[in-house]
Image (cartoon, rainbow, N blue to C red):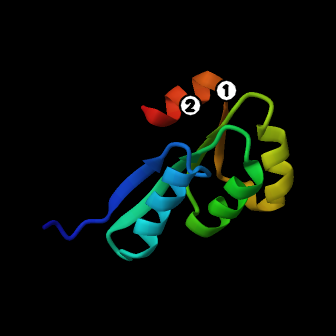
Amino acid sequence: MSDSIQGLIILGSTGSIGKSTLSVIDNNPGLFRVDGLSCYSNVEVLADQIQKYAPSIVATAKGHSDKLRELLGESHRGLQILEGEKGFIELAE
């Protein structure tokens, strides 16, 4: 097994499968790094996840990025926030 940390993008991180995936990450410290997260509209939970996992990029559905920025305040500096279908595609790529 490699000694390097595996970076992950979690699509739908605020849903049940996404939360379960993050739980696996929490239970395996030093193996994984969260590089990106996405949600459709649950930006309140996404904001908490951003604070905990410090991804470099996130995506939300169109019309939700302003609320996310408001929730994060100044802590979103340096975080790339994408929006809409194009944002989800860019995150996945």
- Residue found at the very far front of the displayed protein: 16
Quarter of the picture holding the N terminus: bottom left
Q: Which residue is mark 1?
A: 84
Residue drawn 59% across and 22% down? Answer: 86
x and y percentages locating residue 25 in the rendered image: 42, 67
In the image, residue 41 sits, relative to residue 34, either above or below, namely above
For numbered disc 1, what is the local secondary structure?
helix
Q: Are marks 2 and 1 in contact (CB under 8 Å)?
A: yes
Kind of residue at badge 1: Gly
In the image, residue 19 sits, relative to residue 12, either above or below, namely below
For numbered disc 2, what is the local secondary structure?
helix
Residue drawn 16% across and 66% down? Answer: 2
x and y percentages locating residue 82 in the rendered image: 65, 35
Residue drawn 42% across and 31% down? Answer: 93
- Give residue 56's mark: none
Q: Quadrant of residue 63?
A: top right
| Pointer 2 local density, CA inside 10 Å: few below 14, some 14–19, many at least 20 | many
x and y percentages locating residue 49 in the rendered image: 63, 61
| Pointer 1 local density, CA inside 10 Å: few below 14, some 14–19, many at least 20 | some
- Distance between the Cα atoms at labels 2 and 1? 6 Å
x and y percentages locating residue 53 in the rendered image: 56, 65
Q: Which residue is mark 2?
A: 88
Asked whether 41 or 4 is in front, the reply is: 41
Kind of residue at badge 2: Phe
In the picture, measured across the screen, residue 1 lies left or right of residue 55, that is: left
